[in-house]
Amino acid sequence: MSKALTLLADLMNVPKTMATLIRYREAIRILTWRDFRARYRGSIFGILWAVAQPLLMMLAYTLVFSYFLKVRFGSSDSPTVFAVYLLCGLVPWNAFAEGINSACSLIRISPNLVKKVVFPVEVLPVNLTLVTMIQQLIGLGLLLMLVLVVGNGLTLWILLLPFFLLLQFMLQTGLSWLLASLSVFIPDFRQATSLFTLLLMFITPIFYPETLIPERFRFLVTLNPMAQIVGMYRHVLLEGLPPTLEQILWAGGISLLFWMVGYVWFNRTKHAFPDYL
């Protein structure tokens, strides 16, 4: 009973988790900046690849889904409108999928850091999440320019974007803590996670509007926190509307749950990592 109460107290102790990350903020900053620069070091176009990747994906998917399959968002037949809606889903999704897939090999590719007694290994998944979200911010900058060009302008609801980013950061970091730890003990999680993200991508309304999903399967979207986060981005950026209360409560609750479960699990298993490396 006492162990269960201790575990429950750890799960509910959000301030302790935040205090830990604040204490190691300098290590997180250094690692994040180092890893972000390393991604483009030596390439000819450098950081421009962070813009080119979502842009090229948007063009390819727009060609397939808008021109060939005639998928439409709302009442507009314009491929340009479709492209903006698509990019609004792709930008957060790409960061999320890359982050949790990379988390599966994060501990195994960092044995020198993991085996250091004084190194706070729990910052590695945080660092990974921040690197992918820096790329997401670059994509959001591109998206905002496209919205201003082809959309109806921006409203004050855009001030909620930091809140959406916070929810995504908590969800992605929590999953990264879980997957980084589990993959140390069960290497097959890396392949399983790749399949999971592929399936999750197609039940997240990125390439199609939610209205195309049959009613009996809509619960899959409701249960999917990334679908709620993508929906919030679209409400604010493309429709000039606030997110629904259901989206806020569900995405916020699930993100916080994964954040705390991931941190507690990682913190309780990290002492065993060196034995498996």
Image: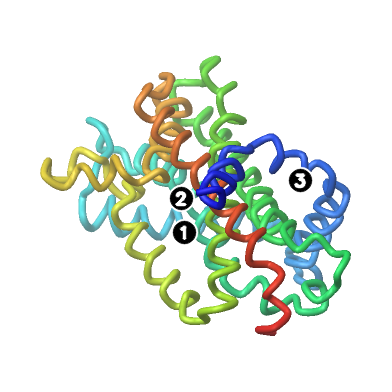
Q: Amino acid at mark 3?
A: Leu
Query: Which residue is at the front of the view, 204 or 63?
Result: 204
Q: Quadrant of residue 5?
A: top right
Distance between mark 3 and mark 1 Cα atoms:
34 Å
Q: Is residue 106 above or below residue 60?
A: below
Residue topped by disc 1: 57
Q: Which residue is mark 3?
A: 21
Residue 20 appears left or right of 164: right
| Mark-to-mark CA distance, 1 and 2 | 8 Å
* 1 vs 2, front mark: 2
> Is disc 3 surrounded by few (<14), some (14 to 19) or many (20+) residues within 10 Å?
some
**Disc 2 target residue:** 90
- Foreground of the two, 114 or 267: 267
Identified at 52% across, 54% down, the residue is 96
Specify whether residue 169 is in view: no
Task: State which quarter of the image contains the C terminus.
Answer: bottom right
Could you classify mark 1 by the number of other residues whose Cα lies within 10 Å: few (under 14), some (14-19), or many (20 or more)?
some
Q: Position of residue 168 (x, y in %)?
A: 54, 43
Q: Nearer the viewer, mark 2 or mark 3?
A: 3
Q: Earlier in the sequence, mark 1 or mark 2?
A: 1
